[in-house]
């Protein structure tokens, strides 16, 4: 515990976020699709969303007539049941669709037999529905059954058999079983090329799905070659505006985006959107998905205003055309919430997050991967909105469900472990946080070894595990090991993804932080200079870090120039009240204070505090930090009354928000004690120091270890008592009274 209080430097705050996985996750629709049923299957369902709405009462009427005239198990009746199920699935009513598919399948097995084409079509479509619901365990045996029967009845190279091969492969991709999926994709492609020719639509579908797999396993060159082949052939065979051609265009754009080639991805996204608007109409579901995907790209580029406008356009139309509970609608809801969270608009993001979570629970089920993603995102948002109990509860639920559904070593599970650990650290529960951090470290080591063996040492997922392990070593203060892993990952990222890819830059920033920890400011500066140059919000974090490095070296003029640059860009790009803009302002104030420009510093501190109180609330941690900084400055200027008033406000807010013994509350008590001591109110300071000591001693008993700040607090208390002219014996007596009840437990 520092003599001048728990003052916290704001600059490190953003850097710590860059080290963690606590980021709201966005989802992109899988644009490569394979029909789950036979090419010859009959359906009266239109591909137009408006026509679907009109078709439902017609199908229901036909079904009712057939049930009365032909009976509930007549083949024509069951085909109508199947058609209605397909329509409900398309509309996002998965529960209704599943009930009808199961009814049709059960009757077809009894009436037509388990090997009849209509029965197998129901098997395949039910498997596809279960896959959409995230029920991979029930979907896989159905996929395998359809494949085996079709292979036996129709032959290994029949189009329906090859469709079953492709569908099983796609399911394995979703499960993360890339090794099992790849031979199936390759087998389907070779057979279709031989039987149908290299440019048949079904062959090109195999090309597209194999490209999806190569992208997943990190073979971006192979994936791009296949994407370009499919796009070129579809343009020639089907025409530039055919839905499959536009799907290929969207797939190639998504691949370029993943590679970090935003400049290459943007024209493809815009071209696909324009063509779909002209060919299908502005509110067709595929058009709206193009709008959504362009929004996702703009968000990654940092153009939040354009991204928000596109998300809102897609969402408004999807609600009207597809309905408020359709999966595509919920994807837009979730991603708009993630964007608002990224912009710092936590109030606007929360109702969207809540809506996505509640509806996904109802439509997809409580343990669907998308539901769990919404749960994890909601937890992060609750933490930002200071509902720490609610955030911890959701974090723990998401972690348990992901362990059960995805397994303990799945990347999403590891993210949940890390997020919960970060939350516990923030809440002052250091013991459980460290336990989770240790567990995440062991899990991450295992995952890294598996990925090196199953994928490739330079596969993006392998490199992600390596980076995650380096971040955990950083958290554990094992800087040497963290640096070695980080350098390996950075070298591989530069080779695989390129020097400008976001993942490469993220690792570069971590390495720079590690070099700073070792005092190698020259090396850190060199890395920061490689990262800087753009005005993307993420790069401004590196501007702050570079400014901090210059500040540490005493180059205040250079640091001020960089802080001013970051502040200017953030005000223009994010607005004057965005959390990152306020952080830049606070950094500038700290520098001005260090330069003894107290008037300039006070003006900025007061501006930041006023906005944070209004936007975040008086109990938010960032607001409390602003109070501390302003109070400390006022104390430096000799305005002890003003400083005392601020510290008392902060203490009252902490007690309300966190409770009397929370570390943040004790921090404010300590700050007030220090101020009272400085103002020669030794009796008041003594009382405050005793409260801090009691809290730290209690925390030490609970954890079974001496709190790291305990000795410093004892020193501060001892110093205060000496200023009160107490004798050594009196001081020892007071310390013994305080310490005796706890010493036997520590």
Image (cartoon, rainbow, N blue to C red):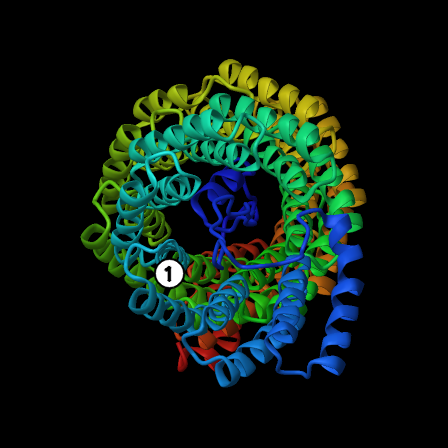
From the viewer's side, name the closer residue of 410 and 445. 410
**Crowding at mark 1 (Cα within 10 Å: few <14, some 14-19, many 20+):** many
Check the image and report above or below for 521 versus 673: above
Apparent side of residue 286 relative to residue 317 in the rendered image (left or right): left
The residue lying furthest to the left in this view is 453
Residue 464: percent from left, percent from top: 34, 46
Which residue corresponds to the image point at 79% horizontal and 70% vertical from the top-left? 61
Which residue corresponds to the image point at 50% horizontal and 86% vertical from the top-left? 110
Apparent side of residue 456 relative to residue 540 in the rendered image (left or right): left
Residue 401: percent from left, percent from top: 49, 71
Q: Is residue 730 visible?
A: no
* Residue at the disc numbered 1: 168
Residue 690: percent from left, percent from top: 59, 66
Check the image and report above or below for 675 versus 293: below
From the viewer's side, name the closer residue of 222 and 616. 222
Q: Secondary structure at mark 1?
A: helix
Q: Is residue 657 visible?
A: yes
């Amino acid at each position: 515990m520092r003599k001048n209080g728990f003052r916290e430097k704001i600059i490190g705050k953003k850097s710590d976020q860059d080290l963690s996985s606590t980021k709201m996750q966005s989802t992109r629709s899988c644009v490569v699709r394979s029909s789950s049923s036979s090419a010859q299957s009959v359906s009266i369902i239109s591909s137009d969303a408006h026509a679907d709405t009109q078709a439902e009462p017609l199908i229901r009427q036909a079904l009712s007539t057939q049930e009365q005239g032909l009976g509930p198990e007549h083949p024509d009746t069951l085909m109508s049941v199947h058609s209605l199920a397909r329509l409900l699935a398309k509309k996002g009513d998965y529960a209704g669709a599943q009930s009808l598919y199961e009814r049709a399948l059960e009757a077809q097995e009894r009436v037509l037999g388990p090997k009849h084409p209509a029965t197998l079509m129901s098997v395949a479509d039910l498997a596809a529905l279960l896959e959409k619901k995230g029920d991979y365990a029930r979907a896989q045996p159905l996929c395998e059954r359809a494949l085996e029967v079709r292979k036996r009845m129709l032959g290994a190279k029949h189009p329906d058999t090859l469709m079953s091969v492709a569908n099983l492969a796609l399911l394995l991709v979703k499960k993360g079983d890339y090794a099992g999926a790849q031979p199936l994709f390759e087998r389907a492609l070779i057979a279709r090329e031989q039987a149908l020719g290299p440019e048949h639509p079904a062959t090109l579908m195999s090309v597209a799905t194999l490209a999806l797999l190569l992208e997943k396993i990190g073979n971006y060159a192979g994936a791009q070659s296949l994407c370009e082949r499919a796009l070129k052939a579809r343009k020639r065979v089907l025409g530039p505006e055919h839905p499959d051609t536009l799907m290929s265009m969207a797939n190639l754009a998504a691949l370029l985006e993943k590679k970090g080639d935003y400049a290459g991805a943007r024209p493809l996204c815009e071209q696909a959107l324009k063509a779909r608007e002209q060919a299908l109409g502005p509110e067709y579901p595929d058009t709206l998905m193009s709008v959504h995907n362009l929004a996702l790209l703009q968000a990654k580029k940092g153009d939040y205003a354009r991204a928000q406008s596109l998300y809102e356009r897609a969402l408004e139309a999807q609600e009207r055309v597809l309905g408020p509970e359709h999966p595509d609608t919920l994807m837009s809801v979730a991603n708009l919430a993630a964007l608002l969270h990224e912009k710092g608009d936590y109030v606007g993001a929360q109702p969207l997050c809540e809506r996505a979570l509640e509806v996904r629970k109802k439509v997809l089920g409580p343990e669907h991967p998308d539901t769990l993603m919404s749960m994890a995102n909601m937890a992060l948002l609750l933490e930002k909105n200071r509902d720490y109990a609610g955030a911890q509860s959701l974090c723990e639920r998401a972690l348990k469900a992901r362990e059960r559904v995805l397994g303990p070593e799945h990347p999403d599970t590891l993210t949940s472990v890390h997020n919960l650990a970060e939350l516990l650290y923030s809440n002052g529960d250091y013991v459980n946080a460290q336990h989770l951090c240790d567990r995440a470290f062991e899990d991450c080591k295992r995952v890294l070894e598996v990925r090196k063996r199953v994928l490739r040492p330079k596969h993006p997922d392998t490199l992600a595990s390596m980076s995650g392990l380096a971040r955990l070593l950083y958290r554990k203060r094992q800087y040497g090991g963290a640096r070695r892993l980080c350098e390996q990952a950075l070298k591989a990222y530069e080779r695989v993804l390129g020097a400008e890819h976001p993942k490469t830059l993220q690792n570069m920033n971590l390495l720079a932080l590690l070099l700073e920890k070792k005092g190698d400011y020259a090396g850190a500066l060199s890395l920061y200079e490689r990262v800087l140059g753009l005005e993307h919000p993420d790069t401004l974090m590196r501007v702050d870090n570079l400014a901090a490095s210059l500040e540490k070296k005493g180059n205040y003029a250079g640091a001020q120039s960089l802080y001013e640059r970051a502040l200017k860009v953030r005000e223009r790009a994010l607005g004057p009240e965005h959390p990152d803009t306020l952080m830049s302002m606070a950094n500038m104030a700290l520098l001005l204070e260090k330069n003894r420009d107290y008037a300039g510093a006070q003006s900025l501190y007061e501006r930041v505090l006023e906005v944070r109180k209004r936007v975040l609330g008086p109990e938010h941690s960032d607001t409390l930090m602003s109070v501390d900084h302003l109070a400390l400055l006022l104390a430096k200027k000799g305005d002890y009354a003003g400083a005392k008033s601020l510290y008392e406000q902060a203490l009252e807010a902490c007690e309300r928000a966190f409770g009397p013994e929370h570390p943040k509350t004790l921090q404010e008590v300590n700050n007030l004690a220090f101020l009272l001591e400085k103002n020669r109110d030794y009796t008041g300071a003594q009382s405050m120091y005793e409260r801090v000591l009691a809290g730290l001693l209690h925390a030490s008993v609970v954890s079974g270890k001496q709190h790291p700040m305990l000795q410093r607090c004892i020193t501060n208390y001892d110093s205060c008592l000496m200023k009160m002219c107490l004798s050594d014996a009196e001081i020892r007596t007071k310390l013994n009274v305080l310490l005796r009840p706890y010493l036997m437990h520590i």
